[in-house]
Image (cartoon, rainbow, N blue to C red):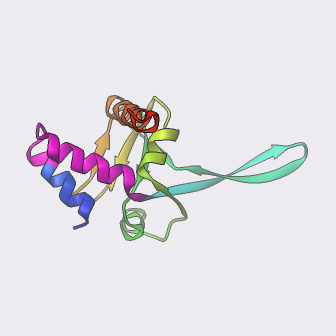
């Protein structure tokens, strides 16, 4: 069980506890995640370039960005070694599109889905932090 798992379990046990909420989201924003990527080819002026994009999975009509807090969890989920990018949680929040959902640690006991409202709230927290408020 990772520290993030423990913080998530504490938040799930008492979702109204501001200390549990602060502990989980603070740890989340500062955790390095493993984001599976796929390579796409693009043609630009007769040159083919490979571009790496985060893997987005559609489920029940929603698009999910999938990521894991350990490489082993990613590989276990994919049932093989998977190329990935490593990004901190705050970077995920900064680059995430409004219509994208998140799926963290899929296939583990400690999986979590984030909806657009929760992701926008995290973006707001980051904006306040950057402004020094």
Of residues 69 and 65, the one drawn nearer to the viewer in this rendering = 69
- Relative to 85, is 42 above or below? above
Question: Is 99 part of what is drawn in magenta?
Answer: no
Give how far across and how far down residue 83 sits, in percent: 55, 64
Question: Is 26 part of what is drawn in magenta?
Answer: yes
Q: Quadrant of residue 69?
A: bottom left
Residue in the picture at 36% in, 47% down: 103
Q: Residue furthest front?
A: 132
Residue in the picture at 45% in, 54% down: 88
* Side of 102 where 110 appears, left or right: left
Quarter of the picture holding the C terminus: top left
Q: How many marks?
A: 0
* Side of 47 where 32 appears, left or right: left
Give how far across and how far down residue 114 sits, in percent: 32, 39
Residue in the picture at 36% in, 66% down: 73
- Relative to 47, is 60 above or below? above
Give how far across and how far down residue 60 sits, in percent: 36, 34
* Side of 40 where 66 appears, left or right: left
Q: Residue furthest right?
A: 46
- Relative to 92, is 83 above or below? below
Give how far across and how far down residue 121 sits, in percent: 34, 31
**Magenta stretch, overall SS:** helix
Quarter of the picture holding the N terminus: bottom left
Q: Residue furthest left?
A: 13
Of residues 85 and 20, the one drawn nearer to the viewer in this rendering = 20
User: What is the span of residues highlighted in magenta in the rendered image?
Assistant: 11-32
């Amino acid at each position: 069980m990772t520290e993030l798992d423990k913080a998530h379990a504490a938040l799930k046990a008492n979702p109204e506890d501001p200390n549990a909420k602060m502990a989980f989201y603070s740890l989340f924003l500062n955790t390095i995640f493993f984001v599976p990527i796929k390579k796409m080819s693009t043609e630009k002026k007769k040159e083919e370039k490979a571009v790496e994009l985060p893997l987005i999975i559609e489920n029940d009509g929603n698009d999910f960005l999938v990521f894991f807090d350990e490489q082993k969890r990613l590989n276990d989920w994919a049932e093989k070694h998977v190329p990935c990018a490593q990004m901190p949680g705050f970077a995920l929040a900064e680059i995430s599109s409004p219509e994208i959902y998140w799926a963290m640690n899929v296939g583990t006991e400690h999986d979590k889905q984030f909806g657009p409202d929760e992701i926008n709230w995290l973006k707001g927290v980051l904006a306040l932090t950057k402004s020094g408020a």
